[in-house]
């Protein structure tokens, strides 16, 4: 209490607050006049107390901001946890399927080599056949537009070419189905290939109509 009063604290104190301090000092003096300290000391005490309260209020506002930040962070963390659970559920389904497929492929070294070889060449062969057909049909359509007098001959040539390509496709699919028949667990793929063969036959019939 012997510490000198700071001038900055006196300047920050408004006249209204100073009057309030005077009233509080007067009440304290009336309660116990014998032990009453000077107004200057009490005024300094109240002023410093107000400064501390203001700092506490500022810190409280900072704490509220921090709390709001942590609340937002927790919400984001909960969303990440939910996403992680979804990923884990997907992994629980995908990983066993992947392991099952690997196990089937590794049953026989010969089957594995044959399947790997065929799978590596089948897309290229299919792509070559389809591209050849599309290119040929496009060229023939352009030719038909320019040479209307020879339409029947061009159609016969197209028909022969399509028949040849269909035969190539059927041979390719047949060899693929024979390869898949090595393991009965590939029946589903075989059924899909049968559906493709039937679809090609339907397209062929529609084209000839």
Image (cartoon, rainbow, N blue to C red):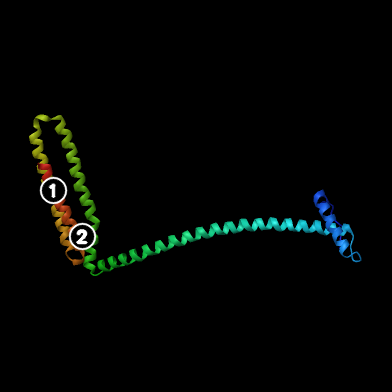
Task: Give the SS element for disc 2.
Answer: helix
Q: Can residue 175 be seen in this view?
A: yes
Task: Give the SS element for disc 1.
Answer: helix
Count of number-bearing discs = 2
Residue at 20% from the left image edge and 46% from the top image edge:
130
- Residue receiving disc 2: 189
What is the spatial separation of the Cα atoms under label 2 and label 1, in whole angstroms? 20 Å
Residue at 22% from the left image edge and 49% from the top image edge:
127
Residue at 67% from the left image edge and 58% from the top image edge:
60
Left or right, 126 with reference to 27: left
Q: Of discs 2 and 1, which sits in the foreground? A: 1
- Residue receiving disc 1: 202
Q: How crowded is mark 1: few (under 14 residues within 10 Å), some or many (20 or more)?
A: few
Left or right, 101 with reference to 138: right
Residue 138 is situated, as x and y percent measured from the top left of the image, at 19, 38
Q: Which of 116 and 58 is in front in this view?
A: 58
Residue 11 is situated, as x and y percent measured from the top left of the image, at 82, 49
Q: Can residue 14 be seen in this view?
A: no
Q: Nearer the viewer, residue 95 or 6?
A: 6
Among the two numbered marks 2 and 1 on one chain, the one whose residue lies closer to the N terminus: 2
Left or right, 23 with reference to 90: right
Left or right, 55 with reference to 90: right
Residue 50 is situated, as x and y percent measured from the top left of the image, at 77, 56
Disc ID at residue 23: none
Relative to 145, residue 126 above or below? below
Residue at 85% from the left image edge and 60% from the top image edge:
27
Residue sitting at the far right? 34
The N terminus sits in image quarter:
bottom right
Relative to 198, residue 95 above or below? below
Q: Residues within 10 Å of mark 2 (few under 14, many from 20)?
A: some
């Amino acid at each position: 209490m012997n510490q000198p009063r700071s001038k900055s604290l006196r300047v920050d104190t408004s006249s209204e607050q100073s009057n309030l301090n005077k009233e509080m000092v007067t009440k304290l003096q009336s309660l116990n006049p014998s032990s009453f300290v000077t107004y200057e000391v009490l005024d300094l005490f109240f002023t410093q107390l107000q400064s501390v309260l203001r700092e506490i209020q500022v810190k409280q506002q900072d704490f509220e901001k921090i709390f709001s930040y942590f609340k937002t962070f927790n919400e984001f963390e909960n969303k990440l946890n939910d996403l992680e659970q979804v990923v884990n559920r997907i992994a629980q389904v995908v990983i066993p399927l992947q392991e099952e497929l690997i196990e089937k492929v590794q049953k026989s070294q010969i089957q594995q080599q044959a399947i790997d070889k065929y799978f590596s060449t089948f897309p290229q062969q299919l792509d070559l056949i389809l591209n050849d057909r599309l290119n040929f049909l496009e060229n023939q359509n352009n030719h038909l537009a320019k040479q209307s007098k020879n339409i029947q001959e061009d159609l016969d040539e197209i028909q022969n070419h399509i028949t040849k390509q269909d035969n190539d496709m059927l041979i390719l699919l047949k060899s693929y189905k024979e390869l898949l028949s090595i393991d009965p667990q590939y029946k589903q793929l075989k059924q899909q290939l049968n559906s493709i063969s039937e679809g090609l036959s339907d397209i062929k019939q529609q084209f000839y109509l």
